[in-house]
Image: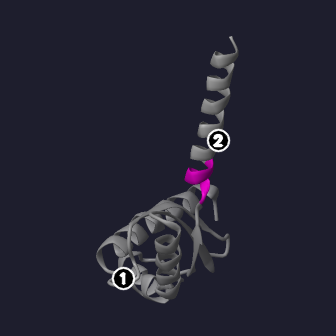
Amino acid sequence: MTKYRTGRLNEEIKKNVSVIIQNKIKDPRMSGLVSVTRVNVTRDLSYAKVYVSIFGNEKSKEDTLNALKSSAGFIRTELSHSIRIRHIPQIIIELDTGLEYGMHINSLIQEIKEKGKNDE
């Protein structure tokens, strides 16, 4: 399988999983805004690691992540209705902390800039 095909499949799964999460999951533990940031499918198409970013406090993030992990089978079933491939991969939900890490680095840079202005 070429990288181009894998990339297209990653984007197709990302788009469809995002729609499924927003419109079809009715779990009461889901609170806050959930965004699918990226998807990585293994070469043999047996697993798809779905990275999600969840906005909210720590408790709501944990509850929402648990709800998403428990609904992975439902997401896979719904994905099979919208994507026509021979084998639908197992869905693994992971929390993407890249956005929080980026905001933390940005705040550190701002502190350094402010400290540099005050020293002048």
Q: Residues within 10 Å of mark 1 (few under 14, many from 20)?
A: few
Residue 15 vs residue 45, the one in the foreground: 15
Residue 93 vs residue 44, the one in the foreground: 93
Q: Earlier in the sequence, mark 2 or mark 1?
A: 1
Q: Amino acid at mark 2?
A: Ile
**Range of the magenta residues?**
97-101
Image position, residue 79 (x, y; %):
42, 79
Label 2, label 1: how far apart the Cα atoms are:
41 Å
Q: Residues within 10 Å of mark 2 (few under 14, many from 20)?
A: few
Residue 16, by quadrant, is bottom left
Q: Is residue 51 left or right of residue 33?
A: right
Q: Are marks 2 and 1 in contact (CB under 8 Å)?
A: no
The residue sitting at 41% across, 82% down in the picture is 29
Q: Can you say whether 107 is above or below 19 in the image?
A: above
Image position, residue 67 (x, y; %):
47, 83
Image position, residue 61 (x, y; %):
50, 70
Q: Secondary structure at mark 2?
A: helix
Which residue is the extreme one toward the front?
118
The residue sitting at 42% across, 77% down in the picture is 84
Q: How many marks?
A: 2
Q: Secondary structure at mark 1?
A: helix
Check disc 1 and report the residue beneath it.
Answer: 81
Which residue is the extreme one toward the top?
120
Q: Is residue 44 left or right of residue 89?
A: right
Check disc 2 and report the residue beneath it.
Answer: 105
Residue 31, by quadrant, is bottom left
Query: Depth-wise, is mark 2 or mark 1 nearer the camera?
Result: 2
